[in-house]
Image (cartoon, rainbow, N blue to C red):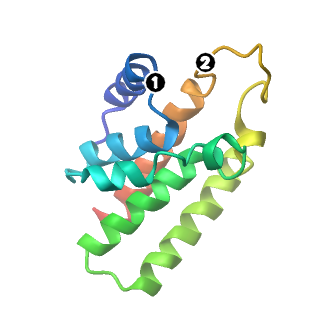
Amino acid sequence: MIDYEYIRKTVHDLYWGIDENCARTTLRILSHIFGIELEDQTLDAAIGLHGAGGYRAQCGLVEGTLMFIGIEAGKAGKSKKEAVALCYEFASSFESHFGSLRCSELRPEGFSPDNPPHLCEGLTCSAIEFSAEFIADHFV
């Protein structure tokens, strides 16, 4: 069972408490939900995955989930081909549900110097809930 309140509280705490990015937030929360211990190196690898380091390319909510699917697929003994197919399926499902995979198109209000921080908090909660459900459906 996915604890949606945990997701909402943790997203808020990570965003406002330590100014965490969306990809690392996604990895941290999914790892907690599915009982995976993340290595520091994995979190380090996701340091610039918030729209490609702010370039506004692929959304970090997608990237963090794709990384987690790879971790979970390895744990489940899936082949590389199966892992890639699951990543493709997730990306297609995410795009159908949210309308895009691009940070620049998903971010509320787009990008402006006047934007307050963490505009994506609500989207992050929804996306992590979506990701957790996808992973539960495919791995649990």
Q: How many labels does the image show?
A: 2
Asked if residue 106 is positioned above or below residue 15 in the image, the reply reads: below
Residue 114 in picture, x, y percent from top left: 77, 13
Q: Is residue 91 left or right of residue 102?
A: left
Q: What amino acid is labelled 1 in the image? A: Asp
Secondary element under disc 1, as helix, strand or loop, is: loop
Q: Where, by quadrant of the figure, is residue 50 drawn? A: top right
Residue sitting nearer the eye, 79 or 117: 117
- The label on residue 117 is 2
Of the two numbered discs 1 and 2 on the same chain, state the one appearing first in sequence.
Answer: 1
Residue linked to disc 1: 19
Residue 117 in picture, x, y percent from top left: 61, 18
Q: What amino acid is labelled 2 in the image? A: Pro
Q: In this view, does 45 lie to the left or right of 101?
A: left
Q: Which residue is drawn at 72% across and 43% down?
A: 56
Label 2 near label 1: C-beta < 8 Å?
Answer: yes
Q: Residue at x 64, y 45 (%)?
A: 51
Residue sitting nearer the eye, 128 or 3: 128
Q: Residue at x 66, y 40 (%)?
A: 54
Q: Can you say which quadrant of the picture contains the N terminus?
A: top left
- The label on residue 116 is none
Residue 110 in picture, x, y percent from top left: 79, 30
Secondary element under disc 2, as helix, strand or loop, is: loop
